[in-house]
Amino acid sequence: VTDASYNSAGFDRGHHCPSGDRTNTIAANSSTFLMTNMIPQAQYNNQIVWAGMEGSLRRLVTLGNEVYIIMGSYGIGGTGNGGFKTTIDAGRVTVPANIWKVAIVLPNGNGDSARVSTSTRVIAVDVPNNNSLFSSWKNYRTSVDAIEAATGYDLISRLPAILQATLEARVDNL
């Protein structure tokens, strides 16, 4: 996959880890532009919904928090500027149907996993990969349990089972 793989594909080069989250060094920022950090993302999904969420998470950091982020995609087929596609670049890159993110928010400190409690804020979103999205990322909030059911992953699994169950069942409403 090269930069040209996205030319005229109708999808943005959506970053798994956004450039704006890795600005402490040139090397860290440059690594966000590797093609292994990209997915075909519908333009309005990327530039409106996803950008809004990324900005909100960065604001939480400036307010004295650490934010641990897990992000991925699932399914096949999205609708970009050129209509519905299951792949781009002559079939070499799969277009995901949904893009999800889980963010665990902790006040700055040490011993992070030991500081996770039932009151820890966990934000989970699951967004369709299409161009009909013109609203806030908050409209796509869901539970970690729902993302796990859609992906088959077991997220935040290093926490004690009762704490994991509590946090994964909740839908953020702040």
Image (cartoon, grey):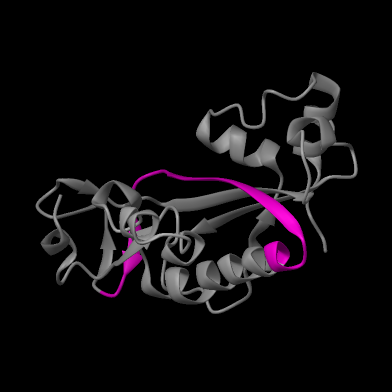
Residue 91 x/y as whole percent: 14, 47
Residue 168 vertical placement versus 15 (above, below)? above
Residue at horizontal 42 percent and vertical 64 percent from the top: 19
Q: Quadrant of the C terminus?
A: bottom right
Q: How many marks?
A: 0
Residue at horizontal 47 percent and vertical 67 percent from the top: 20
Say which of 117 and 150 sits in front: 117
Residue 99 x/y as whole percent: 48, 53
Residue 130 is drawn in which quadrant? bottom left
Say which of 14 and 66 sits in front: 66
Q: Which residues are magenta?
A: 60-81
In the picture, measured across the screen, residue 144 lies left or right of residue 26, that is right
Inspect the magenta stretch and tell me whether residue 66 lies in it.
yes
The residue most toward the top is 161
In the picture, measured across the screen, residue 106 lies left or right of residue 40, that is right
Inspect the magenta stretch and tell me whether residue 171 lies in it.
no
In the picture, measured across the screen, residue 21 lies left or right of residue 105, that is left
Residue at horizontal 30 percent and vertical 52 percent from the top: 95
Residue 151 vertical placement versus 172 (above, below)? above
Residue at horizontal 24 percent and vertical 71 percent from the top: 10
Say which of 11 and 22 sits in front: 22
Residue 97 x/y as whole percent: 41, 52
Residue 40 x/y as whole percent: 31, 58
